[in-house]
Image: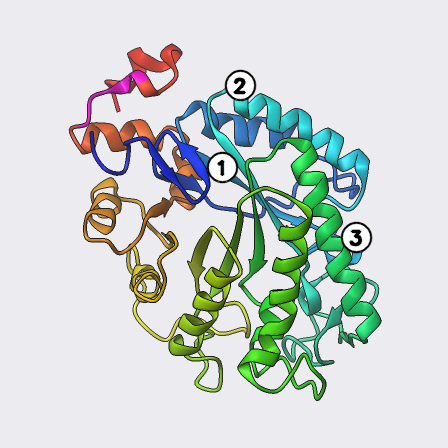
Amino acid sequence: MSKLLSPVQIAGLDLKNRVVMPPMCMYDVQAEDGLPTSFHHAHYGARAIGGVGLIIQEATAVTPEGRLTKNDLGLWNDAQGQALAKMVSELHQLGTKVGVQLCHAGRKAKDATQPLAPTALDYDDQGSFKTPKEMTLADIEEVKAAFVAAAKRAEAAGYDMLQLHGAHGYLINQFLEPMTNHRQDAYGGSLAARFRFLKEVVAEVKAAVSLPIWVRLSVSSYAQEGNSLADYQTIARWLEELGVACLDISTGGVLPLSPNFPIYGGYQANFSAKIKAAVEIPVTAVGLIKSPELAEYLLQNDQADLIEVGRELIAQPNWPAQAAKQLHDHDFSVYNHSYQRGIGQL
């Protein structure tokens, strides 16, 4: 079998293949209560049937005011945990492992009455986001406690892993970056001080649950004044020392900037490779990876340990079967038997 589609023990999980559905916001909680709907059951269920090894649920808020939008999923109360447990059980029955990305949007909480941030700086000058409140030490303690409480609900719901969203300009990322963190206390200043919030969230969540903890990072802000890649290699090593099981490597989102380099299939894999070179724990690659051949190449050349297929899985829920076809990997028994007749036509 190909490396992409072979079973693997990695990052604290037994996976049937290395295809990961990354967290992608759907903004489909129409009731604004954070509860999953029939859409979420069908959306994730289709990718489980399609043969994905691991599904990481979209950004799931740890507080109501920490939602990206009012239409996000949440894990800030027990009713949400119980509802999500049903979905997790269904996905397990369909043969996939399931994780959840825990998130606080910080200053990018579009519908919050009063967004929170390390420093009271607007995301942009267009007026599309409210000016955030600079977090007090009490606010910091409350948000850390919310991450811990959500992680406990995730474990009780049966998730196989959890991911802390430290990327794309959300709260943890805001603490890490010098452009968004101008604090003069123990949570601002040096790289180590800016890392303190994430360090404490990881340590406190790890003490509260036994699930493998992953962290997603944006390792480039596309701004010269932001953290360097060398800074993020240092952060990656610190996270490894804290017992983080895997690093999910992305870029951007801290400022309203587009990439300052050409965009192509696998355009972020170079960043994954640089982080992978700095740590021993597994690292994922993501970013317009549509081609199974490219995914296999990245794995074979040790640029990543797991491949996250995002937009292509939205377009093609049976992408793993397509990958098997294109990689001449014809052991289709790993996919849902009901689709055998159709797989040969892909």
Locate residue 105: give its quadrant: bottom right
Q: Nearer the viewer, mark 3 or mark 2?
A: 2
Question: Where 153 falls versus 229 (above or below)?
Answer: above
Residue 47 position, x and y percent, is: 46, 30
Q: Secondary structure at mark 2?
A: helix
Query: Quick one: quadrant of the C terminus?
Result: top left
Q: Residue at x 67, y 39 (%)?
A: 154
Left or right: residue 180 compared with residue 236: right
Looking at the image, which is closer to me, 330 or 127? 330
Q: Residue at x 41, y 40 (%)?
A: 20
Q: Amino acid at mark 2?
A: Gln
Query: Quick one: quadrant of the N terminus?
Result: top left
Which region shows up in magenta? 329-333
Q: Secondary structure at mark 1?
A: strand
Residue 139 position, x and y percent, is: 81, 68
Q: Amino acid at mark 3?
A: Pro
Judging by the rendered image, the residue that carries numbered circle 3 is 64
Looking at the image, which is closer to me, 292 or 213? 213
Locate residue 9: give its quadrant: top left
Judging by the rendered image, the residue that carries numbered circle 1 is 55
Query: Which mark sits nearer the N-terminus, 3 or 1?
Result: 1
Judging by the rendered image, the residue that carries numbered circle 2 is 93
Left or right: residue 123 compared with residue 275: right
Query: Which mark sits nearer the N-terminus, 2 or 1?
Result: 1
